[in-house]
Image (spheres, rainbow, N blue to C red):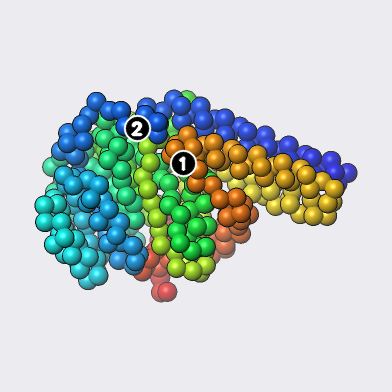
Amino acid sequence: MLISLIILCALLYLSLLGFKTAYALVALANMPETHSAAKRFRVSGESAQAEVTIVQPLLSGDPRLQQVLATNLQTLPEQAFLWLIDRDDAVAQQIAAALRASFPAAQITVLLCDPAPDGINPKAWKLELARPLLQTTVCLVLDDDATLPAASLRALVQHCPVRGIVTALPHYQQGNNLPSQLLAQFVNNNAVMTYLPLLPFTTPVSINGMCYALRRDFLQQCGGFAPVLRHLTDDLAMAELCRQHDGDLLQLAVPVEVQTSVSDMRHYRQQMHRWMVFATLLLQQQSKGTALLITLLQGIHPLLLWILLLLCIVQPATLFLLVLVLVMRSAAMMLVQKQVTGAFRHRFGLSLLSELLQPLHLLHALRERRIRWRSRVYQVKRNDQFHVAES
């Protein structure tokens, strides 16, 4: 009986893995651009940069902030940047001043923003304050811990729909400590399936809020960022706003590189807790059928892996099945990552540990609804109902 249960768990895990891998590879092959084609565009780099403003809400607290911003300035020397900084964030202002001095030819505009009122998304608040300053055809929103390759910028401009939002795929760089590497493995294991449509012929549930672009005219027709001000997960809110205005959600396979500095395991736990709370908010806004499908595709496999691991410990004679599952798992992830980024980002032990920790992070998110977002702490009830809390 126990052996049959182990075989069943292994078959279920491999079936789910096989479906997700095959679907991801087919979807990636059918995307407008893949990694292998990311350098072949009819739009020149100069033309793309002239048509877009990169808007970045900045917030100090990440020790790599200055380095990441400098990398973008070096990679995109002709690009117009609009940096949105809290009026009381002296550190971010000092970083901006230092970079303007180091890159005198860079097109950098700094907008100092008053603090967001309680119950208002601070990122969306800054973006809405910046909207009157947008003059280019395309607005590209980029997180302050992300670096955008020139080829990805050209792809996003090339394929930016007249009505809709186009996004890049996030890929995390390996950090120099265990917590940062665990975080990178979580993102790199799940990014493709997180942002792809759930099924063929459907649209993505949400967008990659770390890097997305839309036309200024369409943004104005949507009412700017004002309709999403009271939504904590602004990426999910922007996707819904786009759908409400009959816009398209287009996911490209071109990468945006991200590396969040994670100082220790406590910081890692806080980051994963925030993301898992966001995941529960996404599920709350879906129909029962969609929520069930998301749970099946994204939430069942870690539980199956836990069951298989524990059962094989009890029944050592079946350990070969666990080894087979783990080998197939690694092969599938490396295959998808190679297709998207041209490189293997998989680390066997860290990737496995990251997946096994997911149910624990989810349980924590369901129990504790207070999140830390760098220097801010929020008590969260729903996506449109949150407030500042004491840390």
Q: Position of residue 41 (x, y in %)?
A: 28, 28
Q: For mark 1, what is the residue? A: 343
Q: Amino acid at mark 2?
A: Ala
Q: Amino acid at mark 1?
A: Ala
Single out the residue that lies furthest toward the right. Answer: 1
Looking at the image, residue 147 sits to the left or right of residue 199; the answer is left
Q: Is residue 38 visible?
A: yes
325 or 237: nearer the viewer: 325
Crowding near pointer 2: few (<14 within 10 Å), some, many (20+)?
Answer: many
Single out the residue that lies furthest toward the bottom. Answer: 390
Q: Which residue occupies 44% across, 64% down?
A: 262
Residue 334 falls in which quadrant of the image?
top right
Q: Secondary structure at mark 1?
A: loop
CA–CA distance in space, label 1 to label 2: 14 Å
Q: Quadrant of the N terminus?
A: top right
Q: Quadrant of the C terminus?
A: bottom left
Image vertical order of residue 238 relative to residue 245, above or below: below
Q: Disc count in the image?
A: 2
Image vertical order of residue 160 relative to residue 175, above or below: above
Crowding near pointer 1: few (<14 within 10 Å), some, many (20+)?
Answer: few
Q: Which residue occupies 76% across, 54% down?
A: 310
Looking at the image, residue 228 sits to the left or right of residue 312; the answer is left
Q: Position of residue 375 (x, y in %)?
A: 36, 69
Q: For mark 2, what is the residue? A: 38
47 or 206: nearer the viewer: 47
Q: Position of residue 60 (x, y in %)?
A: 30, 66
